[in-house]
Image (tube, coloured by chain):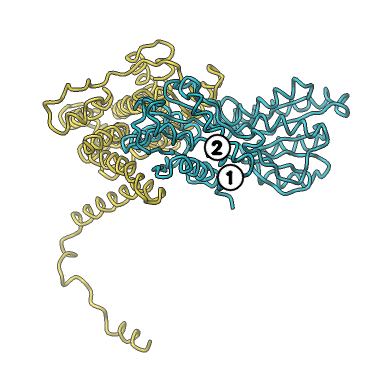
Amino acid sequence: MAYISFLASVLEQSSPIMLAALAAMITLRANILNVAVEGMMLVGAFTAIAVGNASGSAALALLCALVAAIVMSQLLALMTLRFSADFIVAGLGINLLAAGGSLFALEWFYRSPGGLRPITFPDLWHIPAGALSWLPVLGPALEGQSIIVVLSFLAVPACFVFLYKTPTGYYLRASGEDEHAARSAGIDVARMKALALAISGLLAGLAGAQISMDKLHFFLPEMTSGRGFIGLAATLFSGGLPWTTAAAAVLFGFFGALGDRLQALDIPSQFVLMLPYLAAILGLTFARWRLHIRNRPARILKPQATSEPSGSHRADLEPS
Amino acid sequence: MMMTILSKSLASVAGALLSVSILAGAANAADKLSAVYVMSDNLGDMGFNDNAATGFARAEKDGVRTRLLQASPSDPQLWRQNLEAVSNSGEWSIIFTGPNMHDNLAAVAPQHPEQKYVFFDDQLDLPNVLSVKYAQNEGSYLAGALAAIAATDKADFPLSSGEPKIAVVAGMDLPVIQDFIVGFKQGAKTVVPNIEVQVIFIGNFNDAQKAYDLTKTAIENGANVVYNVAGPAGLGILKGAADAKKYAIGVDSDQNGLHPENVIASMLKQIGNSIYDSIGQVRDGKAEFGKLKIYGLANDGVGLVYNDALVPASVKAKIDEAKAKVVSGELKVETAFK
């Protein structure tokens, strides 16, 4: 039983990171380093609670969260593609706008800068208990997960198919690989980049809605707590490949869930809280090391190329 | 960018309010007591700051002129500006200030030796500063005792398994948080010596989802009662306990109503009471500036508020017994500050 709850926890914790990672991946393939995922997630999280509170409909809340995050992404597209702002600077601006704007809305509309906590809130659709009992191991772990967790795992093959099997995906990647070549081939590069940002906004909005709507049913300032940046890191160290990115996100989810369980043991909390990030650094080092090995010119690998210590060097060492 | 514009406009509004109040207050400042609170945060947190505001509201009803200067938590310069402005004005009988203001007060207070300051939830040894601190360890001692009873007394607390297992989910490993934990553990062990207390840290005070996950894990490991020591993220702890159909104990403000079937009590730091008290002492000339005053169980500075629907009178009587021992000095609650 313990492993099922552990697996369920891994899936649940991976979900927002996976969506954030895919959001960053899509833009990375269009040659945009999207640091605004965090801000778009926060806007999604806030909109989900605000709309769910006002309308009482979970579906409408989710839809509005996605729309709001896409609007933020198009604001970023407007600033960078139309007005030629730097992607990093504008992206950080989006993050500040999301953090300050949500706080401002809390104060302005709800007179409560501390957070928004509706008394009752509509529940998202969750996989009913027993529905997947025919599936060993994974079935029970999936039962009780929200629709967004399911969507986050379906988003991986969807992104793969989009990027590698559709013409639009080819155009998008071409725009990222070589802007001038793509333009001379008749691809509207700015439109492709705006599309990448819109998809990124959609995925980030889902991630934000998962955090505020799935279990918590309230919004707090800064509640996304850096998951957008963790997703960005997952994308960067898997080089923007869909399956590797998903694996990296699950790795973060795995170490997050493992850390939660290790806290019950007598291990210093600081060490346990460090685990996911330690895993990230090790993963990044490993990925880079493999890339390095693979790309090393063949001659370096030959044994005679390694230089032996010279005689004069030894002479220097001997007196001491 | 928006934040700076916002805080700048806040600063100018605060400045304008200040000058207006100086003009208006000049006539009766000499005879009427006045108190201003220089804040490092906004109101509306349903916790620390709102609690403090209740003290000023009570004092105002008694005819004290009060003003609360809110400021953005991300604009430390504004906190300093506000503190200097009210100190320079000389219009206020007492200037209150609280968390995050240690260095600012240490710089400003010596320049105004005639001005009286009250510094709460922290300590500064200056002749014109009265420091006020709260014995959260004593309040947590009672919370621990209640948690231990709730975990083991299956008849009165039907959601418990009866196993002696409880947990505390805390924000960060800081001295003031450790003070909560030390008291909580001691209280639980006094009632049920073999109790198992899981101590779990979130790593920050905002990540409510992490708090929720950790609470769920603690409950899967057998915890029957979870104590929230995590500020805003603590709402995730309470939700986690409610979803898992176990008990929780709230903190800072009365959180019993948030999940009425699961939150059995809340541990309050009565910041408002202490502020009201301090104003009264200054009026009577009894305030001991230059000293540290601790608000604990003995003077109702900390305490438990029960969820009456869940906690029966017999259990309350047991907790009151434990409280009486602490108040009489028969039992000393350990502290993380040594």
Judge whether residue B23 can be spotted in this image: yes
Displayed quadrant of residue B26: top right
Displayed quadrant of residue A253: top left
Dot 1 falls on which chain? B
- Give x and y (percent) for residue A59: 32, 14
Q: Is residue A316 left or right of residue B295?
A: left
- Give x and y (percent) for residue B130: 74, 42
Asked if badges 1 and 2 are on one and the same chain, I answer yes
- Give x and y (percent) for residue A227: 37, 36
Judge whether residue A78 can be spotted in this image: no
User: Which residue shows up at 21% across the image and 41% down it?
Assistant: A244
The residue carrying mark 1 is B331
The residue carrying mark 2 is B322
User: Which residue shows up at 40% across the image and 31% down it?
Assistant: B153
Which residue lies most toward the left here?
Answer: A134
Which of the marked residues, 1 or 2, is nearer the chain's N terminus? 2
Q: Amino acid at mark 1?
A: Leu
Label 2: how many residues lie within 10 Å, few (<14), some (14-19) or many (20+)? many
How far separated are the C-alphas under marks 1 and 2? Answer: 9 Å
Which residue lies most toward the bottom here?
Answer: A319
Q: Nearer the viewer, residue B179 or B192?
A: B192
Dot 2 falls on which chain? B
State the hue of chain B. cyan
Q: Quadrant of the C terminus of chain A?
A: bottom left
Q: Is residue A104 above or below residue B290?
A: above
Displayed quadrant of residue B288: top right
